[in-house]
Amino acid sequence: MKKTIYFKFLLAYVIFGFFAFLIVAFYVPRLTEEHLTREKASAMYNEAVQIANNYASGLYNNEVDLETVTKQLDILSVYLKANIRIINPSGRLILDTSEEGIMDHEVIISNFDPTFTAGSYYNIGTFFGQFDQEVLSVIAPITADYKVQGYVVIHMLMDDIKASSDSLMNISYITLVVLILLSLIILIFFSELVYKPLKKITYAAEQYAEGNMHYEFQVYSEDEIGYLAACLSFMASEIAKAEDNQKKFVANVSHDFRSPLTSIRGYLEAMLDGTIPPELHEKYLQIVLNETERLTKLTNSLLTLNNLNTKGMLLEKSEFDINQIIRSTAASFEGTCHRKNIAIELILTGETLFVNADMGKIQQVLYNLLDNAIKFSHQNSVIKIETSEKKNKIFVSVKDSGIGIPKDDLKNIWDRFYKSDLSRGKDKKGTGLGLSIAKEIIASHGEHINVVSTEGVGTEFIFSLPNSKKNEEEDD
């Protein structure tokens, strides 16, 4: 049997109620009875002392007669709900309020011992066999002429004390029941605020463990449990997103590798079986070579992107002239631009403009952006590369007047292997990794890259780089 936290809490609640009942039923009654006994004994003893000093002493000094004392003690006996006696040191009973009127016969208490309380001020027993049930007894000496003339003894039935204790215990039982019922509120609160949310979280965790990362749940709570649920849900969504990206990654890699491999195999088989005559072999071998270059480029891009995503990647930062890097990168595309009749216009701030970054990686960013701009530019168009300095930052802009990027595709262009419908028709050899690599490189520098594009008008990429102190030194 699976023991849930709710079962454990309920078990603890039952154990608490059981032990609470045991304590109230067995331990508290004894304490209550002992407390009432001491309280009654103390009050009775004080009364006995008062009687011995004010009433009984006058009897032995012949100041009052026995009848008067008897009437007074009868009234006091009714008030105290107790039996009052006056006993001689020899054990002869002088007065007993349980008798009606003055006693008309002699009663001797055998073995009477005034020290029967054994150092205490009360005793519980049958008082030398005088009662057939237990009584609470107190004794006070009556002194006259500096001599003990007798004793005032007050008795109260223990059954009366037990009855008072039971009445108090009834109140305790009612209070216990009320407290247990009220404590159910804690159980209800625990169930609603702790157990049910935890059950949702546990079930969600089981779903995630089974691979269902798209399972959604909500816990409406602003405490630690709500925070735990939110973290778990966020974690699952991120894992699901990563899994989706992984599936997309594998699908895109498979697609981009399959196409050139299919072409290579088809052309080679055609040359081997004679479908392609020998005089055309050179032409199709050149196509096969281009396809292998495409595979090499794709592989290198994947390796580059993987290295950029590695945590703790070290950047070989240095201070270099970004204007010079732009000039050399633009020069490397001279042949491509000449074939498409595209001009590259450089609008650079100053003769030199130093930045603090990894020169090789920034050169790769410029290469990828410029390569994209050339691919998607029209014949006889101009590509502008501009640098500017603002608030200790250097901004580099690569702007073309090509086909542009559809508005719906702008948010996806940084994803790996992503190609818009327009770019798929325009760029047959692209890997879809250039912009992803550029973004990763700029992000690793702690900087940002943004894009502004209008379909049919053109696209502009702008990224920032840390300024170098050399620029300030040159200004000085």
Image (tube, rainbow, N blue to C red):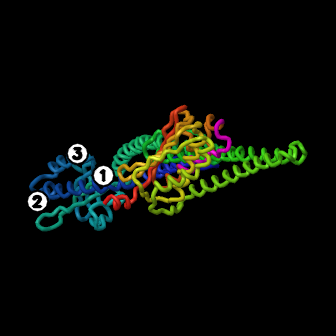
- Tell which tag, 1 or 2, sits nearer the viewer: 1
Viewer-proximal residue, 60 or 365?
365
Q: Residue 110: image x %, image y %?
A: 32, 63
Determine the CA span between mark 1 and mark 2: 28 Å
Query: Helix, strand, or loop for circle 3?
Result: helix
Badge 3 amino acid:
Tyr
Residue at the (20%, 54%) spot, across then down: 47
Residue 207 seen in the current view: no
Count numbered badges in the picture: 3
Going from the N terminus, do you reach mark 3 or mark 2 first?
Answer: 2
Q: Do the CB atoms of the residues marked 1 and 2 lie less than 8 Å apart?
A: no
Task: State the extent of the magenta-drawn residues as a range.
Answer: 425-438
Q: Label 1, on which residue?
A: 156
Residue 427 covered by magenta stretch: yes
Q: Label 2, on which residue?
A: 61
Q: Label 3, on which residue?
A: 79
Badge 2 amino acid:
Asn
